[in-house]
């Protein structure tokens, strides 16, 4: 019996970064249930519980066939008593009563609606709910003054809660490529986040920007933002400058998963015809002739649409969340690995580094505490090798 459980465990190793997790999921009925409980825990600031449910869901995502019997789960890692109860409930009754209960609770519904506003986190939503605010109309009627991000979030609520497609992501990519090429030739731009993992939709589009000559990337973001603003492509943006060099506590602070790159959280105004206009998406390089990059003319972008078309919801553009990150080339591999996700995969990489290898991994660097030195890397493959892990390509990091 001991041997048997060992055997199962060797099929599913306990860290998500030791496993290949594709988008093909044979156990969505269970992983949806566990993910919802994870989300509910995270919205209540119970991060420990949230991670436990995420880890349990990730183990089931890595299985190659549907679970039909609890006995099949023997020896699998990360399945605690609570997660097992949920799985058992789904197996026996087709649904988990706890999940159904959570879904229908006023509190959960309100937390979802309010945190669905860009710029509103669980703490703020919690505070509003305590004041009796459970819906958008109630929020609008309240005396609360919203910050700039929240105002934009509320204004574009429907657009931002509609999944972004890969085609829209590619169209945004062409605009961003054109912007960075215009302000600094030779810049490299890489699609990161969920789309790099092969997802077909996402809640935003993420890009990593670098330049092959170290230092040339400094001060790039404000110029890119100005270009985008001048063409009318931005509905909202907040740029944070790079604070890595000034930070006193070094790059690899294991407790923090926020990095210090120059970045821009934005809301793009994506013209509807930019999507259709998207050519076979080739990566733009500095020597790509301008005319191969088919972008909507600024005049169309500025067109707000008449009142009647707006009311008919026929506005000729839609709002899309976009994250831009700038990395110096020396940190590029770490930034690429850190921003490709999934969030659980990233968390597990850092846990593996710390607990199993006495190393500290961040989106900037890898520090070996045993040798007391930084380990250099110019590719993701090298970072996995430093960590003693088999290389997992982006499409298999969907834990
Ligand atoms: P997200 O865009 O939040 O997630 P995603 O792209 O995986 O999913 P979706 O398709 O719904 O957009 O984050 C992308 C990656 O960036 C994620 O692995 C975590 C990382 N990240 C950081 O490293 N630091 C940060 O401050 C944030 C916000 C994200
Ligand atoms: Mn499979
Ligand atoms: Mn994303
Ligand atoms: Mn993002």
Image (cartoon, rainbow, N blue to C red):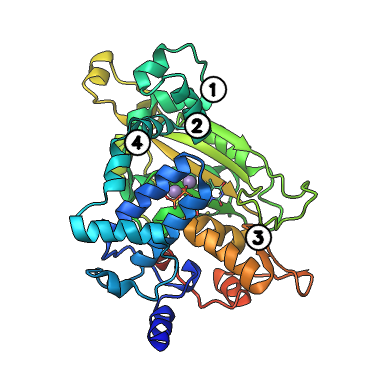
Relative depth, front residue between 6 and 216: 6
N-term-proximal mark, 2 vs 4: 2
For the residues bearing labels 1 and 2, Cβ distance under 8 angstroms = yes
Residue behind mark 3: 331
The answer to whether residue 266 shows anywhere in this view is yes
Disc 2/disc 3 C-alpha distance (Å): 28 Å
- How many marks can you see? 4
Residue 46 on image: x %, y %: 51, 45
- Identify the secondary structure beneath mark 4: loop
Quarter-of-image position of residue 214 = bottom right
Relative depth, front residue between 204 and 222: 204
N-term-proximal mark, 3 vs 4: 4
N-term-proximal mark, 3 vs 1: 1
Disc 1/disc 4 C-alpha distance (Å): 19 Å
- Identify the secondary structure beneath mark 2: loop
Which mark is drawn over residue 256? none
Residue behind mark 2: 119
Quarter of the C terminus within the rendering: bottom left
Give the residue at the far bottom of this rendering.
3
Relative depth, front residue between 289 and 37: 37
Residue drawn where x is 27% and y is 43% of the image: 100
Q: Is residue 311 above or below residue 89?
A: above
Residue behind mark 4: 161
């Amino acid at each position: 019996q001991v041997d048997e459980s060992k055997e199962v465990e060797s099929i599913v190793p306990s860290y998500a970064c030791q496993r290949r997790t594709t988008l093909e999921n044979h156990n969505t009925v269970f992983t949806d249930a566990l993910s919802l409980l994870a989300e509910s825990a995270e919205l209540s600031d119970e991060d420990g519980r949230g991670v436990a449910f995420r880890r349990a869901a990730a183990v089931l995502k890595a299985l190659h066939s549907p679970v039909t019997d609890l006995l099949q789960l023997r020896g699998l890692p990360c399945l605690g008593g609570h997660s097992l109860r949920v799985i058992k409930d789904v197996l026996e009754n087709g649904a988990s009563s706890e999940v159904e209960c959570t879904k229908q609770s006023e509190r959960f519904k309100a937390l979802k609606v309010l945190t669905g506003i860009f710029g509103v986190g669980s703490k703020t939503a919690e505070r509003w709910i305590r004041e009796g605010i459970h819906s958008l109309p109630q929020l609008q009627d309240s005396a609360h003054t919203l910050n700039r991000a929240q105002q934009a979030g509320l204004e574009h609520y429907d657009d931002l809660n509609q999944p972004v497609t890969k085609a829209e992501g590619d169209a945004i990519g062409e605009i961003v490529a054109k912007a960075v090429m215009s302000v600094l030739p030779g810049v490299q731009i890489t699609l990161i986040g969920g789309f790099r993992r092969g997802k077909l939709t996402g809640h935003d589009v993420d890009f990593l920007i670098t330049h092959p000559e170290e230092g040339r990337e400094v001060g790039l973001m404000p110029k890119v933002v100005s270009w985008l603003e001048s063409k009318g492509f931005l509905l909202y943006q907040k740029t944070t400058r790079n604070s890595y060099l000034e930070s006193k506590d070094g790059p690899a602070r294991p407790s923090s998963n926020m990095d210090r790159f120059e970045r821009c959280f934005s809301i793009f105004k994506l013209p509807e015809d930019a999507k259709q206009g998207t050519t076979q998406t080739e990566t733009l390089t500095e020597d790509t002739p301008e005319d191969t990059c088919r972008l909507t003319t600024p005049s169309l972008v500025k067109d707000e649409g008449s009142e009647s078309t707006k009311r008919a919801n026929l506005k000729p553009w839609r709002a899309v969340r976009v994250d831009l990150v700038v990395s110096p080339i020396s940190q590029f591999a770490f930034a690429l690995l850190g921003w490709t996700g999934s969030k659980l995969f990233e968390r597990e990489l850092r846990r593996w580094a710390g607990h199993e290898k006495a190393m500290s991994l961040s989106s900037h660097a890898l520090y070996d505490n045993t040798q007391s030195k930084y380990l250099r890397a110019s590719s993701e493959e090298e970072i996995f090798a430093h960590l003693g892990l088999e290389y997992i390509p982006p499409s298999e990091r969907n834990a």
